[in-house]
Amino acid sequence: TAVRKPLIAGNWKMNLNHLEGIALVQKLAFTLPEKYYAHVEVAVVPPFTALRSVQTLIDGDRLSVVLGAQDLAAEDAGAYTGDVSGTMLAKLGVTYVLVGHSERRQYHHETDEILAAKVVAAYRNGLVPILCVGEGLEVREAGNQVEHAVAQLRSALTGITAEQAASLVLAYEPIWAIGTGRVATPADAQEVCGALRVALADLFGPEVAGGVRILYGGSVKSSNVSEIVEQPDVDGALVGGASLDGTEFATLAANA
Ligand code: PEP
């Protein structure tokens, strides 16, 4: 893990309006002293409606926190009512974009094919995808979590080059651990994250694979983050619930 700077990314999901978002980032900045950013990269991933306000705050106060978005369209512009493109996100100063979060896969029926196109769209616009993979409870109970995550990885990355893959971020998020309070054990997280790195090496070579950050996500809190990010192939966390409180999220980042 030594060469890879840990990333702690807070996915707000459909929470916080733009004013609440500003308040949270101000609290985060107040609670997490600048010195921590030498050891950990911290990103917030607000809903689309709060991106502009949070970006203005980050820019105006020269904060070290980085901006991410929760989704992007596969196309850059056109007749796609309700969608937001990577081109638009890049213009707003967005760095990261989640692709294939389990809630998008489940509630918006995002297929492997759509996700592969979204990964390509992110790179086309200079954004870094945080590609989310992870199994449901049935797959876990059948013992097929590694095969499942690796298959999702391979299908989502069909359209990208090794050069692009070098900046990729992955997130292993077992669905049974998301928002349930049931965190994976550090060994469970390591098993799948390690297998994902082997798959990356197979696709893009060991050097690229060695530089990719692989996050764990699923009920991460300030109290359990350190044992998870201590694992050799876990390079940070994607955080839902615990990212909605500025003090808790700052403590979590400090403990990473
Ligand atoms: C998530 O949905 O990305 C997530 C990890 O949620 P939580 O931390 O609330 O389990």
Image (cartoon, rainbow, N blue to C red):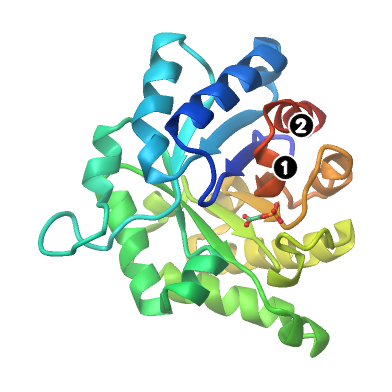
Q: Which residue is mark 2?
A: 248
Q: Position of residue 146 (x, y in %)?
A: 71, 77
Q: Position of residue 72 (x, y in %)?
A: 33, 55
Label 2 Cα neighbours within 10 Å, binned few <14 / some 14-19 / many ≥20: some
Mark 2 near mark 1, Cβ–Cβ under 8 Å? Answer: yes
**Is 28 on the left or on the right of 15, as rendered?**
right
Image point 63% across, 74% down: which residue? Answer: 149
From the viewer's perspective, is residue 147 above or below residue 243?
A: below
Three-letter code for the amino acid on which mark 2 is drawn: Glu
Label 1 Cα neighbours within 10 Å, binned few <14 / some 14-19 / many ≥20: many
- Name the image quarter holding the C terminus: top right
From the viewer's perspective, is residue 236 above or below residue 27?
A: below
Ligand 1 shows up in the quarter that is: bottom right
Q: Please, what secondary structure does the residue beneath circle 2 have?
A: helix
Based on the displayed image, in which of its 4 quarters is residue 80 positioned? Answer: bottom left
Image point 46% across, 37% down: which residue? Answer: 17
Q: Which disc, if any, is residue 242? A: 1
**Assess mark 1: CB under 8 A from ligand 1?**
yes
From the viewer's perspective, is residue 64 above or below residue 228?
A: above
Q: Which disc, if any, is residue 128? A: none
Three-letter code for the amino acid on which mark 1 is drawn: Ala
**Is 256 on the left or on the right of 198, as rendered?**
right
Image point 73% across, 50% down: which residue? Answer: 234
Q: Please, what secondary structure does the residue beneath circle 1 have?
A: helix
Q: CA distance from mark 2 to mark 1?
A: 6 Å
Based on the displayed image, in which of its 4 quarters is residue 118 positioned? Answer: bottom left
Image point 57% across, 49% down: which residue? Answer: 212
